[in-house]
Amino acid sequence: MMRLETDILISGGGVAGLTAAAAFGTAGFRVICVDPSPPVTSANDAGADLRSTAFLQPSVTVLQEAGLWERLFPHAAALQIMRIIDAGGVVPEPRLIKDFNASDVSEQPFGWNLPNWLLRREMVGRLAELPNVDFRPGTATTRLLTRASEALVTLSDGTNVRARLVIGADGRDSLVRQSLGIPVTTTRYGQKALAFAVTHPLPHQNVSTEIHRSGGPFTLVPLPDRDGLPASAVVWMETGPNVERLAALPIAEFEAEMNLRSCHVLGPLTLASSLTVWPIISQIAARMSGERCALMAEAAHVMPPIGAQGLNMSLADLRELLDLAKAAPAEIGSEKMLETYHRKRHLDVQARVTGIDLLNRASMVGAQGLRDLRAKALEALYSARPVRQTLMRVGLGLRSGGKTTETP
Ligand SMILES: Cc1cc2nc3c(=O)[nH]c(=O)nc-3n(C[C@H](O)[C@H](O)[C@H](O)COP(=O)(O)OP(=O)(O)OC[C@H]3O[C@@H](n4cnc5c(N)ncnc54)[C@H](O)[C@@H]3O)c2cc1C
């Protein structure tokens, strides 16, 4: 039986776990990262993650520190304007359009959007450059025991690992979280999301558009051009049965429904990828840490994909862990470090999960009266400039006042 020793064992090599492995590896720590599913690094391969991630400004500094940003930036589409459209009237057409322009709060765009399969390709490439990172795709964490001085992890190939810190980045059913006995609170909405890519005749002009009618938002996020045509990533949230029905339609019928729902804001959309279906829940762990272990990303918090919060919150988790580890490398995994991590992150996580839950419920409403109320609330929030700017800063996760001017 093989025995290994490391500073940090990262359980989970999704986008969050891979970023953490690159960041801690770049900072000089010895890292082992395991995941039972080898990453799919091409859009056309079976199991490819066809979602995209909009990295908001604060996430970019983490990616820079991980040596990832220079690899990712050439493939990214900037997001300058977040457009909210209420199409909740009797006929499915825009009746209220509100633009949140990044220039109101920053000299930088809100963020940059990239396909998830491409993130995995570049992240795996980065890990291969780091001799102190041992990435083991095809291997799961199967058992976790902790004591005050270290964590003992058993892997699916029988290897035993002694680590000073275990990072649970192993998703919403996290084995690390369950082994620590940390409970979760879960909210189910009866909703699912369809994620896919489209091309369209009208340029997106770096505008990300969220269209609200009922069932959940229909969101178009800019991608770089595809075969000379403007392209966007789409997340379409609807009731579960409706998503199953849409996903089973022949392409022409699906495109007709998609175009009705998009209100033709970018002209007729053409499907440019296969469809993937994602269940939608909110979930929050009672704690962000346990003995010798930190939870991050979906192991700690899950929410509906609204406002590009999910992975950006995960990178805020990583930011905190990285700062604490760099400030006191000899202390990684100590009770003091992990208690500080929990305290610094949990309130923010609770506030954002609650906020996104409310936005999702507002977007889901079907009754005409409630949809009218939603449009009035949007109008009111938008009209007061200070409120609008505060909302934008909070959504971005910016820490202090004033405009940001740094170039990524
Ligand atoms: C439709 C959709 C669109 C989204 N769009 C955005 C967006 O624009 N911006 C944004 O910030 N967020 C977005 N999100 C959220 C974002 O995608 C998630 O926050 C992110 O993918 C979660 O990453 P993760 O690494 O925690 O989880 P996962 O991707 O689920 O990774 C967990 C990994 O752990 C592995 N694992 C499981 N069990 C074990 C084990 N026992 N041992 C080791 N490994 C294990 C799994 O194989 C998996 O690879 C979106 C989400 C959805 C559903």
Image (tube, helix red, strand yellow):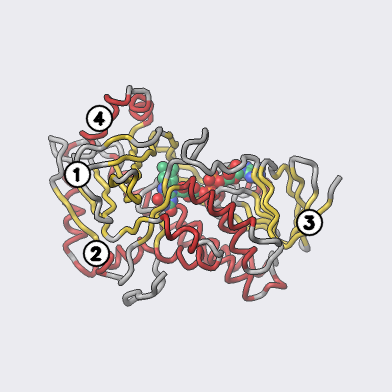
In the rendered image, residue 255, in percent from the top left (x then y), is placed at 27, 30
Quarter placement of the C terminus: bottom left
The secondary element bearing badge 4 is classed as: helix
The secondary element bearing badge 3 is classed as: strand
Which of the 4 image quarters holds residue 138? Answer: top right
The secondary element bearing badge 2 is classed as: helix
In the rendered image, residue 242, in percent from the top left (x then y), is placed at 33, 28
- Residue that mark 4 sits on: 257
Q: Is residue 62 left or right of residue 11?
A: left
Q: Amino acid at mark 1?
A: Val
Q: Which mark is residue 265?
A: 1
Q: Amino acid at mark 4?
A: Glu
Circles 2 and 4 in contact, beta carbons < 8 Å: no
What is the CA distance from the residue labelled 2 to the residue labelled 3?
Answer: 49 Å
Q: Is residue 381 left or right of residue 356?
A: left
Residue at 64% across, 63% down: 25
Residue 327 at least partly seen: yes
* Pair 2/3: label in front: 3
Circles 2 and 1 in contact, beta carbons < 8 Å: no
